Each structure stands twice: as structure tokens, then as C-alpha cells.
Amino acid sequence: EAQVTQNPRYLITVTGKKLTVTCSQNMNHEYMSWYRQDPGLGLRQIYYSMNVEVTDKGDVPEGYKVSRKEKRNFPLILESPSPNQTSLYFCASSLSPGLAGGYEQFFGPGTRLTVL
Amino acid sequence: AQKVTQAQTEISVVEKEDVTLDCVYETRDTTYYLFWYKQPPSGELVFLIRRNSFDEQNEISGRYSWNFQKSTSSFNFTITASQVVDSAVYFCALSGGFSGGYNKLIFGAGTRLAVHP
């Protein structure tokens, strides 16, 4: 079954304790992305990756890191989480976009993070 | 800059009513794509439709229909004969252009639809 998986699904942590949210897709997609969802703001892009070893910032990258060492995996790293990073996080993947984007993105189930 | 506005924060209807969710977008790109996603109470994001900027034909899929009008920069979504299972948050999104990674989706804030029996 084609899918994007994220782990953990729920996480409660404390300020400053490093954490990693994993994301994996089995569709051989080149493009992967992380979004965060906050009430009244919709989803906003944190980081994206066009392919292995190619990553770039989205709209809200502060406080986050990513890596893309394998095509299927795109972990999101919070080196020193703070309460304002409490949010619902989604990983997404899609085919490599054309110059005007356009492909449907497949989303993971979401990770609800609470930073105390 | 690209922007998507969903002015309706919440809509409440009674089952079998028709309901239209509004979406207005802003972009300077001539080629772009518009999407609708559904987020049911379980939280996942479900893809509903993709439309490119060159295709202004309206689309109908069962009880769902979409009206794309470039002249007003709108991509509205209508549910006919709504059902309780339609209760969800609906997001309109835009992608296109060179800013932010080609496939980057710019989401509206979402419209929460509640369908009551």
C-alpha cells in the first residue's frame, strides 16, 4: 500500500530536549516536505527536499533541521524544542514537480507534538 | 506573494442542505495549481481535487463540484445534499512558481464544516 508514515504520532516533551520525528514514504517520490498546522493558520511549510541531499527552507524553518540521506526518509529534527513549536506536524511526498509544481502531495497521518 | 483566503471560518448546516465553501487566491504566476483537501475529525489530510490554471472547466464528482473562475481568482467548492460524514475541515491550497520549491502548497486557514442530522 502506497503510504507516508510518521513516528511518533503523539509526543509530549519538555523544553530543550532534542527530538526527531521520522517520515518515510514507499512511493519512490523525489519531493518531500514538512508542514506544521496551527489553528487559524492552515498548514505552513517548514522545509522541503527536492531529492537526496537537496533540502531548502520553507516559510517557517526557525528551530528545525532536516536531512535527506535516503530517498524514502526525511526526518524532522528539533534540536532544542520550545513551547511555540507545539503543533500538528505533517510530512508529505510527491513526484518531482515541474517548474510550476502541480502534483498531488500525499500526506502522512500527522504527529501531534506538545512542548512543555 | 502567493496567498489563499478562506473567509468562512465555520459553517453549520443541516443534512441535505447544499453548501459552498469559498476560496480566493492571489498569485503572480501564470501557471499554477489549485487543490482542495479534506481533514476529517480523525486528522488525516485527504486529497479531493487538483486543477491547473489553464483549465477553467467546472468539475463534478458525485455530490462534490468545483467552480474555478480566473476572472475572480476563486476556486469554490460545493457539496450538494450534505451528509454528516461531510463534517470536516476543508482546505484550499495553491502551488506554483519558483518561490518555495515548486510543489510547495500555500494553504488557506481552512473552513470547518459541521453537518447536523
Image: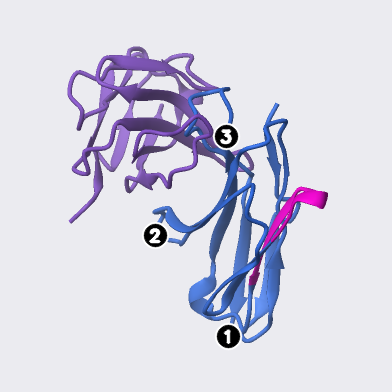
Magenta span of residues:
B68-78
Report which quarter residue A89 is drawn in: top left
Q: From what the image shows, is residue B23 above or below residue A29?
A: below
Instruction: Residue B109: say if magenta.
Output: no
Q: Which numbered dot is residue B42? A: 2
Q: Which residue is mark 1?
A: B117
Report which quarter residue B95 is drawn in: top right
Measured in 3D between alpha carbons, the distance from the residue under mark 2 to the one under mark 1, in whole angstroms, is: 20 Å
- Mark 2 vs mark 1: which is more N-terminal? 2
Label 2 sits on what residue type? Answer: Ser
**Left or right, residue B35 beside residue A68:** right
Label 3 sits on what residue type? Answer: Gly
Q: Position of residue A97 (x, y in %)?
A: 42, 34
**Left or right, residue B1 beside residue A8:** right
Q: Position of residue B90 (x, y in %)?
A: 57, 57
Measured in 3D between alpha carbons, the distance from the residue under mark 3 to the one under mark 2, in whole angstroms, is: 29 Å
Crowd class of label 1 (few under 14; some 14 to 19; many from 20; radius 10 Å): few
